Each structure stands twice: as C-alpha cells, then as structure tokens.
Image: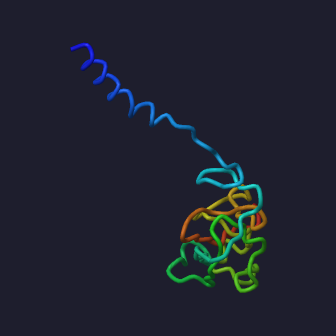
Amino acid sequence: MKKNKLLLLGLLVMPLLASCSETIIHPNRTYPGDPIEDKEEFEETNMTVNFYLDYSHSEKPIYSMRWYMLKPLETCPDEAKLTDADAADPLYPHFLGYSEYSSSIDESKIWNFATDYKQSNILNLYGIWVSGEEA
C-alpha cells in the first residue's frame, strides 16, 4: 500500500516539476508593451482631421485631411488657415486659433500644431473667434 501511495505521489508531482522548466528570454526580441527606443514609423494615415470655421458652422468642414494618429500635425495646412477677414460673426472678428473644444475665451485651449496630438480616428478642430478686447 505504501508503494502505491509513493507511486501516486510521484505521478502527481511529475507534471508540476515538468512545468517549472527553465524559461529563456531573448532581450533582442520585443514584446507587446515593451518601450520602443527608436521612433515608431508611421506608415499609414489612420485619422481624419476636420477643420471648421467655428462650432456654429460645423455641418461641413472647410478642410478635411488624413493624418497619422499620435503624431502632431506640425503646422496648420494652408487650406485651413483663417484670417480675420473670414469671420462669420461681426461681433467676434478676430481669429484666435483652432481648438478641439467648441469655445474658448483665451489661448488656454488653442490647439498647438507643433506638440498636440490625439489618439482617435477623427479629430475635429473648430475656429475660435473673439471680440477685440480678448485678442
């Protein structure tokens, strides 16, 4: 009977010992979640950027383009640049810049093309217009 118990115990412990085999990690191979030291190459445009005159005129963008998610736009495209002459409301004749938010009374929410980016399939940027006192 003791021999059977020893044999049974050996059979139960054997799979546990086999599963504790040595794991070899190759540091030159990247795994999901590992930090990437080199800058990631952006190969496909996977985001649509829509530029609107302002939030009130957001039914149709004045300019739309494809861009790379998580990469700053660097500069405002020429087709989307607005001047004070483009103002739709005479009470707010000065163009402050573009914002992801529908309204802003100062430059705190203005989109910085050099550094700002978004992780989304669509980025809507609205023109922010102010009266002469805020500009």
Q: Residue at x 71, y 62 (%)?
A: 116
Q: Give the x, y percent position of residue 36.
A: 71, 55
Q: Quadrant of residue 53?
A: bottom right
Residue farthest left in this picture: 1
Q: Residue at x 55, y 71 (%)?
A: 122
Q: Quadrant of residue 37?
A: bottom right
- Relative to 113, is 61 above or below? below
Q: Give the x, y percent position of residue 17.
A: 45, 31
Q: Give the x, y percent position of residue 90.
A: 66, 77
Instruction: Tell which of 25 and 120 is nearer to you.
Output: 25
Q: Residue at x 53, y 83 (%)?
A: 60
Instruction: Tell which of 7 and 122 is nearer to you.
Output: 7
Instruction: Tell which of 95 and 5 is nearer to you.
Output: 5
Quadrant the C terminus occupies: bottom right
Q: Give the x, y percent position of residue 87.
A: 68, 80
- Relative to 6, is 134 above or below? below
